[in-house]
Image (tube, rainbow, N blue to C red):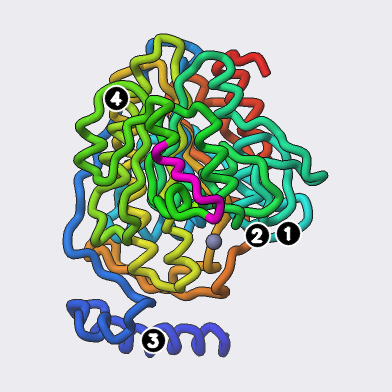
Amino acid sequence: MKIAVKIYLSVIVSLLFVLPIRGQEPNKETIAEEGKYSYQSQSFYEVKTFPQKFKSKNPKNIILLIGDGMGVTQIFAGLTANGGHLFLDNFKHVGFSKTQSANKYVTDSGAGGTAIATGKKANNSAVGVDSESQPVPSIIEVAKKNGLSTGIVVTTDITDATPADFIAHVPLRDMSEEIADAFLKSDIDVFIGAGKKHFTDRKDGRNLLTELTSKGYQVCDTITETENIKEGKIVGLLTEQRVGIRGDQLARTTDVALNILKQNPKGFFLMVEGSKIDDGGHDNNIQYIVEEMLDFDKTVGKALEFASQNGETLVVVTADHETGGLTLVGGDMKAGIVKAKFSTGGHTGVMVPVFAYGPGAELFTGINENTSFFDKFIKELKLNE
Ligand code: MG
Ligand code: ZN
């Protein structure tokens, strides 16, 4: 009885403190002082709902979107900041991916992306090779061999670990010149990102952009230039910047890629990376994370729009790992406010989410290893390895 009274009194006392605070408007100056740990949206974007009926049972095309460093918390921070909704709301088939690498509990993007791209666990820092350092074919290479069109669109250097995992086979992710050369040899139809210097300012003195041009590639420096290309092979090496400066580059260049790749009657495989959600995590900066997260979600919206109209396209969204050990210790869904804490400046070992939409989406539920994507992609597209 005594304990019950004590609890009752402590509830009353806490309510006295909490109630007046709840009624107050959030103070923008306080938020600014808190800097990297608090974020308030200035506006919300509208999220469309797409139909769940598709033309075929198996997809002809796959769009894989990878949010680098995007755990459940990064997604929920974005969802809160956009007033409670994301384009990701459209996904009815949801699962989890276990991200451990061959030699570490906590993976890096080299090993994490290699597992997704090739179906093989790799050691940290490795790119497109298995744990014995042997080259293993990526889904992009297998798709190309089967006559499909292929593409990669990112917001970081195109030679960075995640895109490299789909194209190159090197023991170390910082072998940028070798990775750039692998793009030249890959015969990939569309690749757009940053990192021009790895193609032009090289120790071996070669200019890979000249070589790409003579192979028939159309080389672009700006988003608008890429938008003027309507067919054929295209490489875009744009100025890498944070979302505030680069604007909606990821969504626009994803559109460019889709409009070119869709012309192949045999189908296509496109990988799109929200590369810098990870950078926000390393920086322990919630504003950086939310802006990159929402930029990525709008790109997911572009993919869904294409897939819903096309009817033969599977869209899969996942991450290579979580970054920052982000947790949300407060927020306001209506005002678009999130308050964050971080447990590390590095990556963490937690499962990351998987979302699938379109024909074949039901294969992507449950808790699976990050190596499971490759076989499912092969099966869905009916490719010969
Ligand atoms: Mg990456
Ligand atoms: Zn990272």
Label 2 element class: loop
Read off the residue under disc 1: 105
Quarter of the image where one finds residue 363: top right
- Residue 259 bears which disc, if any? 4
Whether residues under marks 3 and 2 lie with C-beta atoms below 8 angstroms apart, the answer is no
Residue 36 is left or right of residue 137, and the answer is: left
Read off the residue under disc 2: 349
Q: What residue type is labelled 3?
A: Ser
- Number of the front mark, 4 or 2: 4
Whether residues under marks 2 and 1 lie with C-beta atoms below 8 angstroms apart, the answer is yes
Q: What stretch is highlighted in magenta?
A: 203-210
- Number of the front mark, 1 or 3: 1
Whether 212 is drawn above or below 276: the answer is above
Q: What residue type is labelled 1?
A: Tyr
Pick the front one: 263 or 185: 185
Residue found at x 53% / y 41%: 354
Q: Is residue 276 magenta?
A: no
Whether 331 is drawn above or below 310: the answer is below
Whether 171 is drawn above or below 81: the answer is above
How far separated are the C-alphas under marks 4 and 1? 39 Å
Residue found at x 71% / y 42%: 129
- For marks 3 and 2, the one nearer the N-term is 3
